[in-house]
Amino acid sequence: MKETGKIWMNGKLIPFKDAKVHVLTHALHYSTAVFEGIRCYNTPNGSAIFRLPEHVDRFFNSAKMYGMKIRYSKKQISNAIIKTVKTSGLKECYIRPLAYYGYGTMGLTPTLNKVDVSIACWKWKMGESKAGKFSGAKCKISKWIRIDSKSQPMQSKSAANYSNAALARVEALKNGYDEAIMLNNKGNVAEGSAENIFVIKNGIIKTPPLDADILNGITRNSVIQLIKKEHMKLVEKNITVNELLKADEVFMTGTAAEVKSVTKIDKNAIGNGGVGEITKELQKSFMNIVMGKDKRFVRWLTCL
């Protein structure tokens, strides 16, 4: 990773190379951290952060679910994100706020340690998450199931949840696929390793509900709102593997992935094996939104 600009740590901007933590930091041992992934786009009107308030809200909600008390307000964190991006000099980037239990007392109980906060950003161009984005991703149904919400709060974007996702991603890559699709403990479709999932059949768009052990994705929410504005039919319902494999189109959504088409699952072609027309339409519409070209959603952009 190229060192760019500075990293915000506990209220101060410090050189990228000096942003370090102690090896006995609690979060390194017990995954006691929550984070966000946010995009800043280089729009015709200048750099703009996509859905910043919603990301910051989720950041604080994630911390709350784990009993973490962030010592800064939402406004302070939002301003710090903007300041970090401006300091980087990058016109478009990926932004990573992180709250974690720091160095202090070792042992399973995290609350004896203070909660540290950092914000970093790095270069990330639009469409950089290639993995079949426009040509169609090849996905594998993972042997690893999504963590049950009764085990961990899946609505929290916590580091602990992502070891499960990493197992699925690595399994898929080792077997020659671009991405994993994870089922929940009921055998229904949950999500990708880092994306929400949508299926289309006979013009009806379906996506798993939040109680299917999925993250409440901000890109997912954005696409749902877009679908409704375009008067397309959307249903949030549990999706079986059979429904997934027999879909006319499948696509995934995420901060990094944006709207990514899926054309093969295991050894099964989806639809005609190419990127579907509805997926193409949503990809184009989403790009118009993040570029500030769709006035209906310009409120989602925080211009710098």
Image (cartoon, helix red, strand yellow):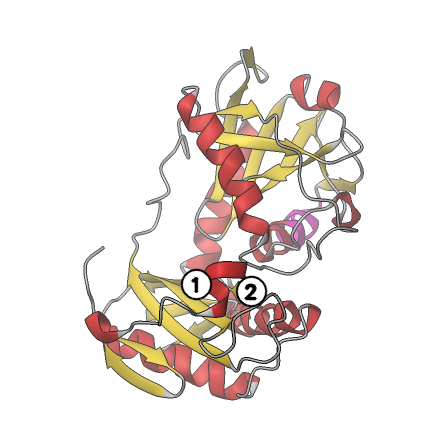
Where 196 sits versus 199, above or below? Answer: below
Q: Earlier in the sequence, mark 2 or mark 1?
A: 2
Check residue 228 for magenta coloring. yes
| Front position in the image: 125 or 74 | 74
Magenta region, residue range: 224-231
Question: Residue 14 lies in what quarter of the image?
Answer: bottom left
Image spot of residue 238 (x, y percent): 80, 36
Q: Helix, strand, or loop for circle 2?
A: loop
Estimate how packed mark 1 is, as few (under 14), some (14 to 19) or many (20 or more) residues with alpha carbons within 10 Å.
many
Image spot of residue 237 (x, y percent): 80, 39
Is residue 45 visible to the viewer in this orientation of the structure? no
Q: Amino acid at mark 2?
A: Thr
| Front position in the image: 265 or 169 | 169
Q: Which residue is mark 1?
A: 292
| Front position in the image: 228 or 30 | 30
Query: What label does residue 32 carry, if any?
Result: 2
Is residue 87 visible to the viewer in this orientation of the structure? yes
Q: Amino acid at mark 1?
A: Gly
Q: Residue at x 55, y 13 (%)?
A: 269
Check residue 140 for magenta coloring. no
Estimate how packed mark 2 is, as few (under 14), some (14 to 19) or many (20 or more) residues with alpha carbons within 10 Å.
many
